[in-house]
Image (spheres, rainbow, N blue to C red):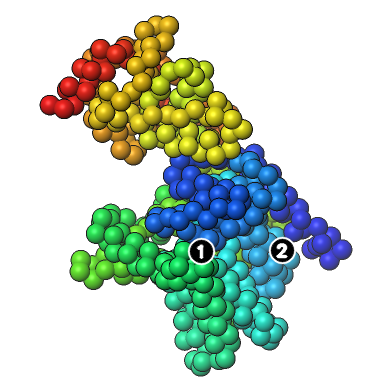
Amino acid sequence: MSRDNSFWFLPALLLAALALRLAFFTGCFGSDEVTYTEQALKIAQGEWARADYIGAVRLGISLPVGFLVWILGRSEFVANLWSLLCSLGEIALVYLIARRFWGEQAAVLSGLVLAFTPLHAHYAGRLMADAPLAFFISLSFFALFEGDRSGRRAYYLCAGLAAGFVWWIKSSVALVYVLVFALYVVRERRLHNKWLLMATGFLAMLVLNGLLFLIMEGDFWKIWRMTTSGAAEYVQKVSSGNDPTFYLRLLLLDIKHTWLLGPLAVAGLLLWLTRNRHDDGLTRVAIWCLGLIGVFSLFIVSFKPLLLITKQVNYAIVFLAPLSLLAGYALSRLGRSLATLVAVALIIPLGIIGTALEQQVIQSFVANSKAALHYAREHPNSVVFGMTSAIRTGNYARLFATSPADAPRIGDIQSLARDAPGVALKADADGFVAHAVFDRQTADWGQQGPYSRAEGLPHCWHRLGELEPTGMGLGSRIVSGLRSAAAILPAAIAEKVARQLDLLARPLPATIYGIRADCLAVTADAAAH
């Protein structure tokens, strides 16, 4: 590749990645992003809200997001900007690492693979800890590699600071992933003073975090206590998700989140093992990759009972960067023409389709919850009750609403059975004192009490109709296009594909019920007995 044009490769790569992430922006699902956002917005207003939930005290999320909101104003896009910037930043890190080790072609291909990996693009549009977590983990390895390349001690300190910031984002992850650096110590067979510099930076960030909590809450050890007690609670309550092969299956068998990334990375590892064991850059990336997958697959969190670290799809984002480097290296060995063909014909199209599907999974899940919020907005004089998803969707919308009318409060559907008499008995024009939304799409998520199944709904609830799902993004059009394209497949396969796509194209129905005052009393009596 010409050096004259190489200046534009990284900006072009980041622009393509940005376009993909904006086109398929995911938005709120209703889980921890509600907690993260609420805490960050309070900080932007100069408030320090004390909290005893670990998600609410992750300063690596709340402080940067709060700062961006304070500078740029309150909106969902600004609140999500920290995740988006970290996602793009990690692509830049992968590009720079690959260029240092193997040249411009491998750099472009490695960055392209990461930019168009659906899982990576998806979490750029979620106000969660995952994208910042992955960025700072990758930054710590980048700084270590740069320190070894240049000999500048400041890079080692930077690596430690980046690792320490991982503690600010997810303290439990910081304690696990730093074990990978021990593999480099073993490889070098000596304790270089660079490890002391890294440890100094890491501990400095931990102390600074503790000092902030000491100043604001008088508790230096708060994060440490919450991390250890949270781990103990996890061991007691979580017994699933401990399969040590989970991430290997995710990358090589159930590949909908990563497509070709796993097989291409395996190709890069095979090249390292069979032909390029003396390639220092390839060895460093292989240790990074295998080390992360190893510790996140095999780390023991309990001996009695024996439990391995819990696995989740979103945790896989932390090793997408080294996987992309291995994949980019393997592609660069194909030659420029064939590598370009694979990128244009496979990586980019599959990345677009996969990211669209990732968006649609979330959008179809919350579409009825958004519709319930819209219904409550259109009936300001009625009390509307909904399920967990609708409640949290309303809570999230209220964080950015300019007036209370824009995001009315959704009541908890459980309370209709628990304390129905507490509902304000003010009938609307049709004689209903309350409305309830039973959402089949989200009935299994959260705590719905006796109303988790349609069969459990009181017979005196008056069915008014079904809500029209709202808020579908560009991903829904991609799903519709795939649904049409599936018709060219053999009949048996086409039917199976169409069935799966139909589940994404339109959520299960949500029914709206009207409840009269006498029905509330009956409901309360039934619940009491």
In this image, 522 relative to 328: left or right? left
For disc 2, the marked residue is 105
Residues at marks 1 and 2, CA–CA distance in whole angstroms: 49 Å
Q: Secondary structure at mark 2?
A: helix
Mark 2, Cα crowd under 10 Å, few <14 / some 14-19 / many 20+, is: many
Residue at 37%, 68% (x, y): give it: 225
| Residue type highlighted by circle 2 | Gln
Mark nearer the N terminus (1 vs 2): 2
Decide which of 4, 505 is in the foreground and name it.
505
Q: Are marks 1 and 2 in contact (CB under 8 Å)?
A: no
Residue at position x 58%, y 34% in the image: 401
Where does the N terminus fall, quadrant-wise?
bottom right
Asked whether residue 109 is in view, the answer is: yes
Residue at the image point whose x is 55% and y is 49% from the top: 42
Relative vertical location of residue 18 with respect to residue 422 in this rendering, above or below:
below
Q: Quadrant of residue 243?
A: bottom left
Q: Residue 340 location in percent, x, y?
A: 69, 54
Q: Toward which corner of the image does residue 465 lie, by quadrant?
A: top left
Q: Position of residue 273 (x, y in %)?
A: 50, 75
The residue type indicated by label 1 comes to: Met
Question: Quick one: which residue is furthest to the top in this view?
Answer: 430
Q: Which mark is residue 216?
A: 1
* Tally of numbered tags: 2
